[in-house]
Image (tube, rainbow, N blue to C red):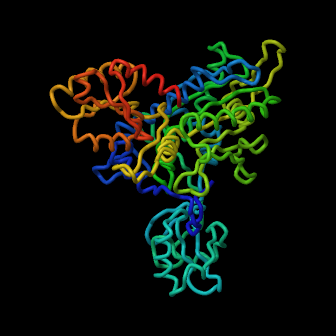
Amino acid sequence: MSDPAVLTETDEQTVDMKDIVALCKRRGFIFPASDIYGGLNGFWDYGPLGTELKNNIRDLWWKSMVITPPIGPDGLPVEIVGLDSAIIQNPKAWVASGHVGGFSDPMVDCKETKLRYRADHLMVLVPKDGEGRWIAYQEGAESDEVEKRVKKLGSGRSISAFEPTPLMDIDVADYDKVSAPDTKTQGTLTEPREFNLMFHTYVGATASEDSKVYLRPETAQGIFLNYKNVLDSSRVRVPFGIAQIGKAYRNEVTPRNFIYRSREFEQMEMEWFCHPDEAEKWHEFWITQRKDWWQSIGVKEDDVFIRPHDADELAHYAKDGLGTVDVEFKFPFTAPDFGELEGIAHRCDFDLTQHQEHSGTKMEYIDPVTNERYIPHVIEPAAGLSRGVLAIICSAYTVDESRPSGMYLDFHPSVAPKKAAILPLTAKEDHVPLATELYKELREHYNVDLDIKQNIGKRYARQDEIGTPFCFTIDNDTIEDKTVTVRHRNTMKQERIAMDKVLDYMREELKKF
């Protein structure tokens, strides 16, 4: 679902995206790429905590798909194997998949500023009385910025005097009335034209069309290219799945909303190969499985929405099938609406058929029992790992003005970068060795933090901000009776437990989530 119109009220929105972005940088979750050089739009680096969070989500997905895949409708575990394919493939693969010819967005250029915009992301304020300047802005722009622009260019009229209209709905002949988003001048926008989103490079010593290759825009095609290899080398039979996690690249013209829409991102995709007659059953199965999985790792139920694609949204591979259903999340920048987190698509037999025709390799499956020959249909649960990180952070961000940090991250322990923090009350000689002893024991089982610097209140605040479920404090009583204080992140409740029982305590408490 696209970003809501900038003029729509979002009373339900309680978390400001600016606060989340600031927290991510301050606490080492996510940094702008090449930050010391001013960054590079659409690219992001994951810091120490962001790397742990992303890896936790990644590993949980892999476990749920490949290591311990779900129980199927017949009561038996489904069969899914893993794959790690190359980022650069033979360019003929992208011709066959339709990406070279059809993977594009409509673009317009501003002849004055030389800036480029996605035409389907531009809105135009058209005067209701038909008189005066038409004012363009980018969908998702801050409402106060649009209001300032209207005051400057709207001849003193208020926003209510204009009708917000998508640029794509405006006749090209009327473009001479439009002021592009970054200029006062009218008539500077070109007609929309298609712009391919794939990054390209060259393989070998010479840069020519013969050596031109592409960075993959999705991980799915690597799975389809290896379908026969997996089938011939592994003990798998239809229905079965192939799962892959990896980087993908799209030359987005207007990357926006932090890491939600970027040019380099990670995907978690699984292609489920099944008999055409069973596609509907498996489509419904994976929709339920994927929604439940996101909730199992901490995405709040009220923030998740299942939305079938409308007919005009369907990708070319889904038009003749069951379509695509999105698992959507209520991001701060889409609230009260939702934005795509994962899609569960029925790709029919499009991809395998295309690669069979272009490569000459037979993609038919021969049923070992019935000898029936067919090209399997594919159900594709495709999730964004990068978007998953953002959804988990947004869902966990909890405002609480009663604590020094003013908030805490309510991470499910399974994804929390640190499961516990060990805090010596002071840097005294007697406190630190005991804290180190406990840390060395726990780190063999969980990712824990030994936090010695600053006063205890500031350290509690830091652990709240990074979402650590438990803090174990070593103080003078620990020296006397070998007990520690455990503080619970969400409730701030404190209790004393024996130091040699901390590991068992954590195991029992984590079972409750």
Q: Quadrant of residue 347?
A: top right
Q: Residue at x 59, y 47 (%)?
A: 303
The x and y percentages for residue 121 are 57, 61
Q: Residue furthest left?
A: 429
**Whether residue 371 can be seen here:** yes
Q: Is residue 409 left or right of residue 327?
A: left
Q: Nearer the viewer, residue 53 or 172?
A: 53
Place of residue 173 in the rendered image (x, y in percent of width and height, measured from the top left): 64, 76
Number of numbered tags placed on the structure image: 0
463 or 311, which lies in front? 463
Q: Quadrant of residue 466?
A: top left
Horizontal side of residue 301 vs 470, given as left or right: right
**Quarter of image, res 64:** top right
Residue 188 on image: x %, y %: 51, 74
Asked if 142 appears above or below 271 in the picture, the reply is: below
Place of residue 382 in the rendered image (x, y in percent of width and height, measured from the top left) = 61, 37
Q: In the rendered image of this protein, does residue 299 appear above or below residue 159?
A: above
Q: In the rendered image of this protein, does residue 505 appear above or below residue 234?
A: below
- Residue 195 falls left or right of residue 39: right
**Residue 215 appears in the rendering:** no
Above or below 108: residue 442: above
Q: Residue at x 71, y 43 (%)?
A: 324
